[in-house]
Amino acid sequence: MTEFHHRYRSLPSLLLLLLIALSFSQQEVVKADCSASDNDFDNDPAIQTMNFDIGYGPQEFRAYVEPDVATFYKAPPESMFRRKPKHPGWAAKFINMSNKRVRLFWDPKNGGPGSPIKVLEPFEAGGTASFPNHQFYVTPFEDESQILHRWSITPPQAVYYFDPITVPGDEEATQTNLDNLSVTDFESYRRHVDSRDFSKQYFNFTGREYLSMYPRNKPSHKIWRADYFGQEHWVTTRETHFVEHPQLTELKRIDSKEGRKRVLREDESRLLQQYRTQEPYLNMTLEVLSCAPRAFEIKNFLSKTEVEHIMYLTTGMDLHRSTTAGGESGTERDQTRNTRTSLNT
């Protein structure tokens, strides 16, 4: 939870350069540059078609459904079972479905005031790390003493809604609240209602909460399959390792927003080639370390020179103790607590 601010230097990040290359390499020339075809990605057995209806007619959604854990070990079906983690930590997301600003607090349940977590803007959300049975509440932005709604963290629920518009069992009051919304606020509220309805059906299909806002854009990057431990993939890139440090006068900052503009084309020469290895390609092997969530190891991803460059950049970091509200609560009360803030993690 440590917050840090980086004093940018004039040097670009060689790691950023390599990450951009890896990110786009399989998209530019998939057949030649990676071990998987489009069919391999599209036929991932863990990505299944979910049929749902949130009031606009039948629709389809491609969702990840965690496979039988035994398949991760290539063992017979249902011969192995997931172990329950010893650490009960749980993440929580709070959504403000009202057109008013509210304050989110963690309740220490010691008779004292709550710890400010975040100011939730109208129809916006915020999250925090937590534990089962922890208590949270929201108040009006102007009055911390008036509690509008309380929650108790209850896994597997991870998303909690503050909805003062819909009054359960009272259609007339609900309609009055809806009529009092502006056209813009009504549209924002409707989107949250649709997302909440979708999330319920998503949970029934996958067993997990939908943490994003529905609908969302289709992912632009493909995800490597992780069918079993030790599974390997490979991808090549012409962005080879740096083995010498470039001169300071040759460097400038790389803007990560440039995206595809930084993709090295087949007919282009490498940037700062004289400081790189002379091999035509860098071949990277991805080995599956975890199937759910998916995690891969890429050995020799960075050269010694690139590691030294990163270590040099870290000398410009300022570390300080994190706060419960990230400096956004607007309260004058001390925002640090021994149970909810960290010193050096």
Image: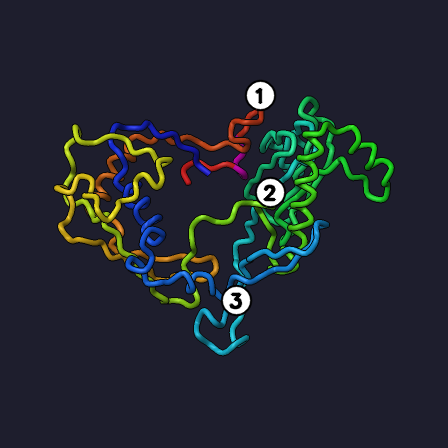
State the residue position of label 3.
67
Is the residue under label 2 in contact with that under label 3 (CB below 8 Å)?
A: no
Of all residues, the one furthest to the bottom in this rendering is: 76
Tell me where residue 171 appears, x and y as whole percent.
85, 40
Label 2: few (<14), some or many (≥20) within 10 Å?
A: some
Residue 250 falls in which quadrant of the image? Answer: top left
Amino acid on which disc 2 is placed: Lys
Query: Which type of secondary structure does the marked residue at label 1 adopt?
Result: loop
Question: What secondary structure is found at the residue carrying circle 2?
Answer: strand
State the residue position of label 2: 93
Asked if residue 57 is positioned above or below residue 344 in the image, the reply reads: below
Which-is-in-front pick, marks 3 and 2? Answer: 3
Q: Main secondary structure of the magenta part?
A: loop
Q: Tell me where residue 19 appears, x and y as whole percent.
A: 32, 45
Which mark, residue 332? 1
Magenta residues, start to end: 336-340
Give the Cα distance between marks 3 and 2. Answer: 26 Å
Quarter of the image where one finds residue 289: bottom left
User: Callout 3: helix, strand or loop?
Assistant: loop
Q: Amino acid at mark 3?
A: Pro
Mark in front: 1 vs 3: 3
Categorize mark 1 by other alpha carbons within 10 Å: few (<14), some (14-19), many (20+): few
